Image (tube, rainbow, N blue to C red):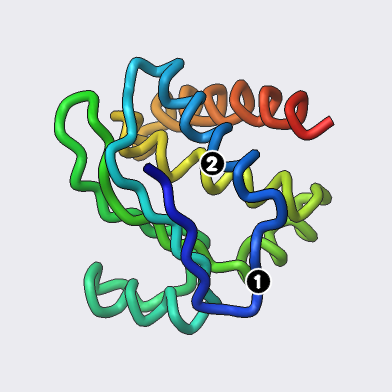
Amino acid sequence: MIELFYETEFEIKESQIWIDWVTESMKSEGKSIEELNYIFCDDEYLLEINRQYLDHDYYTDVIGFDNSEDDVLTGDIFISVERIADNAEQNNVSFDNELARVMIHGILHFAGYPDKEEEEKRIMTEKENFYLNRFQQIKA
């Protein structure tokens, strides 16, 4: 089960499309979702989480707390809507495109895809692009 929570004025329209897309994407990876919470917030909210739990003092677009076991995904993914808007503008993509990229990026980490090394980053980007293409087909 995927739930969406909002700590800001932002809200995803047609949220079931997004939820179904994430669920189906993880099924393609051989994973199931037991309990996944996406929490949409602003920069300051996510900065405080970054400081408190990760001892990092900088803004970021996404932080995930993974409690998954084997092929069953469970956890919380916090997303700064302000960072998404800024990143979308900088990368000349739509807000929805950037939001989808960050949402799938977070859950791909839970599915076992790291992105510390160059090769890992390449694989992560390929996976993101693959699922983004699927999402764009669904939304079309």
Secondary structure at badge 2 equals helix
* Residue found at x 40% / y 18%: 29
* Residue found at x 61% / y 21%: 130
Q: Position of residue 31 (x, y in %)?
A: 32, 23
In screen coordinates, is 41 left or right of 78?
Answer: right
Q: Nearer the viewer, residue 121 or 45?
A: 45
Above/below status of 58 relative to 97: below
Q: Nearer the viewer, residue 85 or 24?
A: 24
Q: Which residue is mark 1?
A: 10
- Give the foreground label among 1 and 2: 2
Q: Position of residue 95 (x, y in %)?
A: 75, 55
Q: Nearer the viewer, residue 67 or 92?
A: 67
**Label 1 to label 2: alpha-carbon separation:** 16 Å
Above/below status of 124 relative to 9: above
Above/below status of 131 relative to 16: above
Residue 20 lies in quadrant: top right
* Residue found at x 44% / y 80%: 45
Q: Which mark is residue 19?
A: 2
Amino acid type, label 2:
Ile
Question: In which quadrant is the C terminus drawn?
Answer: top right
